[in-house]
Amino acid sequence: KTDGDCGDDPRQGRDHPQTSSRRGAATRDKILYLIRHAEPVLPDARRRFIGQADPPLGAPGLEQAHRLAERLRDVPFDAAYSSDLKRCLMTAEVIADAAGVGVRPDERLREIDTGLWEGLTFDEARVRYPLEYAERERDLIGYRFPGGESFRDLQKRVVRAFLEIVEEDGEHVLVCAHRGANRVLLSELLGLPLTELFSIKQDYGCVNLIEI
């Protein structure tokens, strides 16, 4: 079973339910708290391809991570996993430190690799790679970024990591990843086609509960 809890604007702390779906009979009692990292430092407010770039959290993001840790203070976490990128690690460490557990970095939980488009604005990518950009517009899910991944590639590696994590000991497990990574995993768990992944809301600091 998966349930979501996200705010439209994490700095204002509004929370709204997102998704809920059964996934068959449970094999053990385990709850995974799948979260999206807090707000990182970005160059500006323009839409960019920020995949595996590694910006840290800024002051607003750190404040948000501490508020998230406060929300989760009563959860007896047994383990914590995170993408090895700074924005995830910093978020996970704030929450895990409060719970007294260490964070295990896993590069398979990274965001989609946008390859040569990394850091470009959408307009810059459209101008520099017009043919490729048009191809991506025709097939957002299957398109593989030059030197990078497609969303199908992303789903394969994130699901592999998830299946290993659920086999580990512990009843309450924190997993901190990225918007795209969370979306492809939730698509798999909810039985949704990848073409619907963009309908899954994942704001900064989003919490998704996965019961197994």
Image (tube, rainbow, N blue to C red):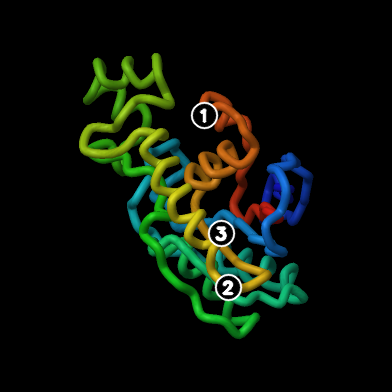
- The reply, left or right, for residue 63 in relation to residue 154 is right
Res. 67 mark: none
Tag 1 residue:
194
Foreground mark, 1 or 3, reads: 1
Foreground residue, 65 or 60?
65
Foreground residue, 66 or 76?
76
Q: Earlier in the sequence, mark 2 or mark 1?
A: 2
Foreground residue, 60 or 188?
188
Q: Which residue: 49% across, 51% down? A: 178
Foreground residue, 160 or 121?
160
Q: Is residue 3 above or below residue 148?
A: below
Q: Position of residue 142 (x, y in %)?
A: 38, 25
Label 3 crowd (10 A; few <14 / some 14-19 / many >=20):
many
Q: Amino acid at mark 1?
A: Leu
Q: Earlier in the sequence, mark 2 or mark 3?
A: 3
Q: Amino acid at mark 3?
A: Ala
Q: Amino acid at mark 2?
A: Asp
* Residue lying at the far bottom of the rendered structure: 100
Q: What is the distance, in whole Å, between disc 1 and disc 3 at their CAs?
A: 24 Å
Tag 3 residue:
38
Tag 2 residue:
169
Q: What is the distance, in whole Å, between disc 2 and disc 1 at their CAs?
A: 30 Å
Q: Position of residue 99 (x, y in %)?
A: 64, 81
Q: Quadrant of residue 36?
A: bottom right
